[in-house]
Amino acid sequence: MCGIVGAIAQRDVAQILLEGLKRLEYRGYDSAGMAVIGSDQTIERVRALGKVQALADCMTQPLLGGVGIAHTRWATHGEPSERNAHPHVSGNNIALVHNGIIENHTELRQQLEDDGYQFQSETDTEVIAHLVHREQQVRNDLLASVRFVAKLLRGAYGAVVMDSNSPDKLVVARSGSPLVIGLGIGENFIASDSLALLPVTRQFIYLEEGDVAEITRTSVYIEDANGVQVERPVQESTASYDAGNKGNYRHFMLKEIYDQPQAVRNALESRLADDHVLEQAFGTDASAIFAQVRHVQIVACGTSYHSAMVARYWLESLAGIACSVEIASEYRYRKSVVPEKSLLVTISQSGETADTLAALRMARHLGYLATLAICNVGASSLVRESDLAFMTRAGVEIGVASTKAFTTQLVGLAILVLSLAQHNNINPEQLKQLVAALKQLPEKLEETLQLAGDIENLAQGFADKHHTLFLGRGDQYPIAMEGALKLKEISYIHAEAYAAGELKHGPLALIDEDMPIVVVAPNNELLEKLKSNVEEVRARGGLLYVFADVDAHFESDDTLRVINVPHTDPWLAPVVYTLPLQLLSYYVAIIKGTDVDQPRNLAKSVTVE
Ligand code: AGP
């Protein structure tokens, strides 16, 4: 959730830390802080409520020093405030930043208070700073102290500690929250995401669960969970330095909406043959595993869950394979029965979402045939801990509201469905047509983006409304859900999605002239049914906005506005119809003046429960 960056160098590190924090702001942005060890071996600390820019504004005198840590926060314990912002300090010498949740913080706090420690914040994090301080009094060995303290903590953490009495090192610990070491020449770095460090290095070491490491300017020493020294591979990042910039776009979200044709092209690249899909995209063992699969369980959160819901329709209708879909936070705490020959699929943009990761770890012992991650971040925990993986190649997504991550997940799922269908007697001619439709998808998305002007004009009709309904049927029902999620996330308008056939069972009572209703209506086998549902709404005075195929023959009038979406193969309509709904929520948010890229109360990557 929170963003961490640290550096140890011969030069002053404050600017590096600040730039790193700006790049990590997507992880949380309610407060930020930084501490460096100055030349007189004292800790200097600045913290500010609000975004990283508020911290930068406070630093009229730059902090000077070659060792430092910094943090951008998404509050879990204690309100967003300067005193709850990290780094937290203990004594005059220990400073610490932390991402995650310490579940046993209350009992640790009590013990520390009994030992005479006074707490300055309401955070769970502060206990770690005091615990390290207490150990350092005895051990005077920062690595040993952190290793000892790590064993006292229950919960999830990625933490970086410095001690001004040992100003030549940073010590870091990872359990449940990602940390990556960046290697420089005569300088080294640490962050919760390599994106933060791209301006200073391309060489990364990803820490594993339970690792504790000591980082100096010239060395990296890592111990695993058993306290045994380990070498972790150095990986070269090919991510673009500018990946975190929005170019000429007003917001990251808008840029990412427009990135989608290329992102989908990237997701398809080298994964399709002329008349079939290449299962190796999922890993070398994929073919042998897919041949056995009789049931698929998909687990995900938020937008990623919506992509899973689309996949269920596809899997059962095209591959003839039973599929269940569940929200990760529910699945992980439920006793479930795993059908024979079942494949567990997790979907996540970040690959670090706590609930999804916990669901994967919990399910590992339930007898699944194999686990597969569909993910945008190759070095993520989810990918590393799964048997198979499909990289969605969306590129860095900064906007909290997920856009290109979703459409590329749908591409990954489409390829998965066809892979399983190939083992399940799909008609070769039908398979060839489905592959051909996939190849055309980027152009369809380009065409669809040309609707932006029309959609911007519609947005005004929503800006003064407090509630909206989104309707779809079949595989468009999850798209309606995703449209509703986008609108509520960034415009704060209450939005509900319904399978249109369900209207008459209750929600029809809500319909009046103050409730705009958005309908997604491609030309598929459910179109006539959907038209009847539209009439049910019209008859009760509802104002409808229908995104429809030209061939669907909707006519605009006083109560119904039609936006014609380019004709597309029905099986890929869920991908195409997503874009107008993203644009709609974006333009409504612009009119409302909300913070599009960093909506209130949310964070991009939810690495805590
Ligand atoms: C989408 O717009 C969200 N901000 C959110 O629902 C997100 O999809 C969810 O938190 C899951 O994240 P993940 O894909 O990184 O696992």
Image (tube, helix red, strand yellow):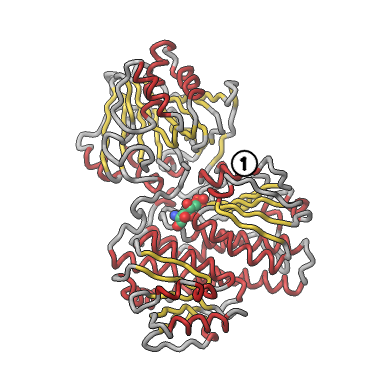
Mark yes or no: residue 565 visible. Answer: yes
Report the side of 297 relative to 506 (left or right): right
> Can you say which quadrant of the picture contains the N terminus?
top left
Residue 92, quarter of the rendered image: top left
Disc 1: residue Cβ within 8 A of ligand 1's nearest atom: no
Q: Nearer the viewer, residue 225 or 526?
A: 526
Mark 1, secondary structure of its residue = helix
Note whether 31 is above or below 125 in the view shown: below
Q: Measuring from the top left, give residue 431's x and y in whole percent.
A: 72, 70
* Amino acid carrying mark 1 in the image: Met
Q: Indicate whether 530 appears above or below 605.
A: below
> According to the image, label 1 marks what residue?
362
Does the rendering let one see residue 379? no
Residue at the extreme left: 60
At 49% from the left edge and 64% from the top edge, which residue is drawn?
260
Residue 394: x %, y % from top left: 52, 56
How many callouts does the rendering have? 1
The residue closer to the viewer here, 99 or 565, is 99
Q: Residues within 10 Å of mark 1 (few under 14, many from 20)?
A: few
Horizontal and vertical percent for residue 277?
Answer: 70, 62
